[in-house]
Amino acid sequence: MSEQVTCPECGARWQDSITCREHFERMLAWEFEDPAGAERVHHLTVLCYGIQHPSLYSLHGLAEAKALLVAFVERGESPASVRRRNRQRLDSGRRTWKIAGTAALSQRPVRWPVTVAAVAPGDPTGYCARVEAWARSICQMLGEQD
Ligand SMILES: [Zn+2]
């Protein structure tokens, strides 16, 4: 009998001892083999994984990652346009990202409806759509927390 292990960060079950990190690396390998798919979802993959594993980020970085994901998913911005806008914002010295509240949020466990363990397994076909659904589900949760 195998022991049931759960990710301490995102709450995913590590079925067959496959960790979130291993799922993530598998997804990156697919993206490496599929440049068009990577172009479409790589920025989402990295943000979704990071937001659900916030120990990868500083508090500031986590707030920034959440703002980016919302910009991509809810406002339909492209990575290029976000980069341009960020550059202007950083140049002007104005910080518009939200920092307050993140500390409390990161201490409250979130019950994510979709985790990397649901996105990575399966066929590479449909992988992009799974990542996009994952990103939408995270944005929805972020909206409910505010
Ligand atoms: Zn996890």
Image (spheres, rainbow, N blue to C red):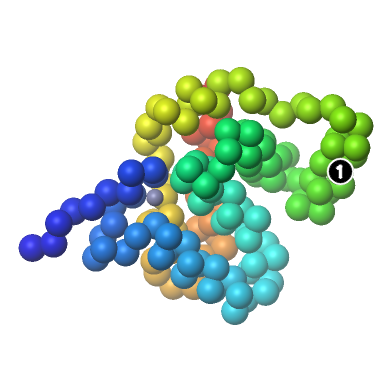
Closest to the observer: 108 or 91? 91
Q: Is residue 28 left or right of residue 69?
A: left
| Quadrant in the picture for residue 32 | bottom right
Task: Pinpoint residue 15: horizontal percent, then vertical percent.
Answer: 26, 60
The quadrant of the rendering that contains the C terminus is: top right
The residue drawn where x is 42% and y is 28% is 107
Disc 1 beta carbon < 8 A from ligand 1?
no
Residue 83: x and y in percent read 81, 48
- Label 1 element class: helix
Kindly identify the residue that appears in the image at 37 percent across and 32 percent down: 109
Q: Position of residue 135 (x, y in %)?
A: 55, 47
Q: Identify residue for label 1.
A: 87
Q: Residue visible at 59% across and 71% down? A: 31
**In the picture shown, does residue 123 fall above or below 10?**
below
Image quadrant containing the N terminus: bottom left
Q: Position of residue 113 (x, y in %)?
A: 39, 42
Who's the residue at 42% across and 63% down the image?
23
Give the class, few, some or many, for how many residues have Cα within 10 Å of label 1's Cα (few <14, many ≥20): few
Asked if residue 39 is positioned above or below residue 103 in the image, the reply reads: below
Q: Is residue 70 visible?
A: no
Q: Amino acid at mark 1?
A: Arg
Q: Is residue 25 visible?
A: yes
